[in-house]
Amino acid sequence: QQQVKQSPQSLIVQKGGISIINCAYENTAFDYFPWYQQFPGKGPALLIAIRPDVSEKKEGRFTISFNKSAKQFSLHIMDSQPGDSATYFCAATGLGARNAGNNRKLIWGLGTSLAVNP
Amino acid sequence: ETGVTQTPRHLVMGMTNKKSLKCEQHLGHNAMYWYKQSAKKPLELMFVYNFKEQTENNSVPSRFSPECPNSSHLFLHLHTLQPEDSALYLCASSQDSATWDTQYFGPGTRLTVL
């Protein structure tokens, strides 16, 4: 119930194309779904996040689509650029991810390595 | 830059060595975290400190010993590590660990245990 399943593991897209990364979760108590972007030699950085009261959130070329009934959410990168080449992690948290110390734990996907060819 | 710094960036140590990783955040946050990042595994939360108090130890072996002298500094003391401990160790901070706030990560320390 605590897993977040992310696919694909790796993705190659041509410049200008659309990159799509999917995540699925089990715990219906999750209520916050961030995507993090990690470049080589750097730590992950928050890219965009969504709460389940909306089905879509867009920031520039990045869009999260959220399907509450299917317990799935996805990241779409429009007009993908070589500078988008990085590893992308989805995550989830919520009341169901609290521990005994009451921290809200982020449950992470395994990551998707995106390469955008010029 | 994220405002979270980590030193050293790379560390090679033998199994009998003792070393320490340092993290400093300049964001005025109250919560700090240690994560382990290994290939083909999800990020593993190791320790959480909230207002300098340890609020989580995620079943981490005792050869890893955290220290949080104040809300801006976090250390991870290492001793008698195993080769399987080789990984990228990430520090992160957030405003508070009990509510949901964005975590800001440092660049990590790449640790190799020989």
Image: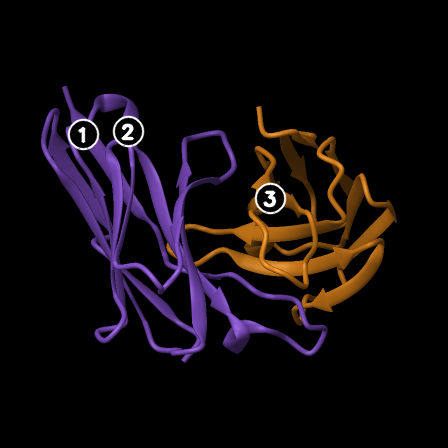
Chain colours: A purple, B orange
A30, above or below A59, in the image: below
Element type where label 1 sits in the image: loop
Query: Please, which chain is the residue tagged with disc 1 on?
Result: A
Q: Distance of mark 3 from mark 2, alpha carbons?
A: 22 Å
Front residue of A50 and B17: A50
> Going by the image, does B92 lie left or right of A88?
right
- Which residue bears the numbered disc 2? A84
Determine the residue positioned at 71% across, 34% down: B27
Determine the residue positioned at 75% across, 60% down: B63
- Which residue bears the numbered disc 1? A80
Q: Is there any visible trace of residue B18 in the rendered image?
A: no
- Which residue bears the numbered disc 3? B90
Name the outermost residue toward the front: A53
> Going by the image, does B84 lie left or right of B30?
left
Q: Distance of mark 1 from mark 3, alpha carbons?
A: 28 Å
Query: Please, which chain is the residue tagged with disc 2 on?
Result: A
Element type where label 2 sits in the image: helix
Amino acid residing under circle 1: Ser
